[in-house]
Amino acid sequence: MSNPYSNPIPPSPEARDQELGNQLRQIEKRDWWIWGYSIFVILLLSFAVVALALPAVRQGADTVFKIKMIEAVFGLVALVVIFNIYAISQEILIKRLRRQLAEKQGHSTLLRNLAMVDPLTGLYNRRFAEQRLAAEVARSERKGHPLTVLTVDLNHFKQINDTYGHPAGDQVLLEFAARLNHVIRGSDLAVRLGGDEFLVLLPECTLEQLQLVLGRLGSLEVNWQGQKIPVSFSAGWKEYEMGDRPEDLLARADQALYARKRASRETQQSAELTETKPAPLRVMVDLTCPHCQRMNSFAITQNSGAGNTSRHDVRCAHCKEAWAPLMPGPIMAGPFPK
């Protein structure tokens, strides 16, 4: 059995960034060395040109340094050739290092995207959101700028998956994420927390401005294989108050979201019960007063399905005596006694 600890642990994106930075500094040092050698050779060549142009300098070199000018020229030519060979080799090395650096940078960007970006919607994920939220909270605490945290949850998303399939659910998430990213500002941040839950960080945004964002988000219809899928959402939000921690903001925004979701569900259930509940039966009944034996008309109401009718003491319209009209059994739709 292979040892699970035998393979080295891949470096983190931060370690890769540090390594890339070190290699960049090495390339810059090599560039500076080449520039220094170039300046040195240019100075030597300038001295040679001046020496060849001025006979006095040539004669002084012959008498003082015992150096023939032809030997100095050959020496400079050899130095230039050596320098050119060195510069060419360094440029080849620098190009190879830059190519390796670009490849590593591409891998680092890919790893960062895998670690920070949701692969389905292209929005940032929870890990990046927590880092950004901590930075925004620190900035709001330091400068006093408003900060609003908005959480969004799609309604009946499981029903969409069960009815149309998971590919349709993925399409709903994709289009909702695009709409969400479109209605916010460039300084805001839209995040997919997971499943059908989203988070929006709104720096320098008050609750009044938040209502504009929710209004622009509105409702959505997703076309899926010739069918239109209506998409609605529930939202909860929390405005930053001095001393709030990032995790507190998220927790309170979630609490507000699920409180509104429960209230909306209860309201919908109540409305459905009201729609399905039959209207109460209201009938007019004529009964004889037991005191004065005169006819009285009464409005009697009974809910459908009730076992009996609620009765109240009434007064005769003629003798004003109180009595309880007796109607045995539930009130049904006629005929009624006269």
Image (spheres, rainbow, N blue to C red):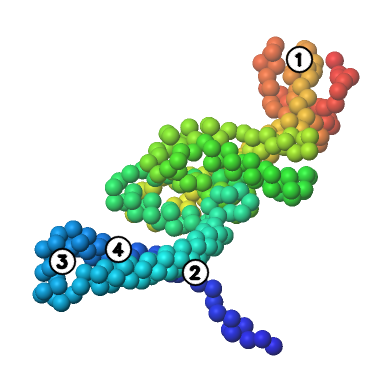
- Of residues 291 and 23, which is closer to you in this image? 23
Q: Residues within 10 Å of mark 3 (few under 14, many from 20)?
A: some
Residue type, mark 4 in image:
Ser
Helix, strand or loop under label 2: loop
Q: Is the C-beta separation of discs 4 and 1 under 8 Å?
A: no
The amino acid beneath tag 1 is: Ser
Q: Which residue is mark 4?
A: 38
Is 287 drawn above or below residue 191 in the view shown?
A: above
Residue holding disc 2? 12
- Of mark 2 and mark 3, the one earlier in the sequence is 2
Is tag 4's residue or tag 3's residue first in the polypeptide sequence? 4
Q: Nearer the viewer, mark 2 or mark 4?
A: 4
Label 3 secondary element: helix
Q: Are marks 2 and 1 in contact (CB under 8 Å)?
A: no
In front: mark 2 or mark 1? Answer: 2
**Alpha carbon separation for disc pair 2 and 1:** 88 Å
Disc 1: which residue = 297
- Badge 1 crowding class, 10 Å Cα cut-off, few under 14, some 14 to 19, many 20 or more, is few
283 over 83 or under it: above or below: above
Which amino acid is tagged 2? Answer: Ser
Please tell me which residue is depicted at 37% across the width and 52% down the height of the picture: 137
